[in-house]
Image (cartoon, grey):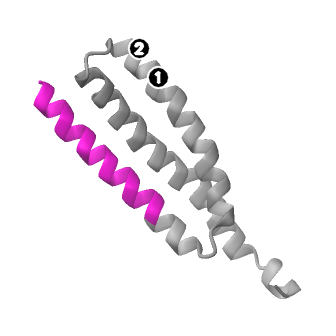
Amino acid sequence: MTASLLLRPLPLLSRIAAAVFGGYACCWGFIALGLAGFYAAGMGFHDAEHLSSILGLLLYLVVFCWTFAVPRVGRAWALLLGSGALMAGIATLVQRALA
């Protein structure tokens, strides 16, 4: 890469925003899905909540680092927001089935 590509602030700010906010959206959906799935499988509510939160924190660290390694920042935004929305939607369906 040339020095001019490395010093442009907009792509870097977009990656930082994707890592922070896109990673948050993805992990929020993961935690919601994990909580609903673990609870539906018979685990206690607070146990399912804690386990899915711990796994979500680990996922956030992986997703945060992955966002800076992916070649195109648009792909990172699409995958993070899309997967977060998909997992949150599935979690909503599971929660409605339980109620």
Q: Main secondary structure of the magenta part?
A: helix
- Checking the image for residue 51, the label placed there is 1
Q: Residue type at mark 1? A: Leu
Instruction: Label 1: state its secondary structure.
Output: helix
The span shown in magenta is: 79-99
Residue 36 is left or right of residue 98, and the answer is right
Residue 83 against residue 29 in the figure, above or below? below
Q: Residue furthest front?
A: 41
**Quadrant that contains the N terminus:** bottom right
Say which quarter of the image contains residue 90: top left
Residue 64 locus on image (x, y percent): 63, 51
* Residue occupying image coordinates x 57% and y 34%: 57
What residue is pinned by disc 2? 47
Residue 46 against residue 5 in the figure, above or below? above
* Residue occupying image coordinates x 51% and y 46%: 24
Residue 72 locus on image (x, y percent): 59, 76
* Residue occupying image coordinates x 34% and y 53%: 85
Residue 33 locus on image (x, y percent): 33, 37
Question: Are the residues at dot 2 and dot 1 in contact (C-beta closer than 8 Å)?
Answer: yes
Residue 74 locus on image (x, y percent): 52, 74
Instruction: Label 2: state its secondary structure.
Output: helix
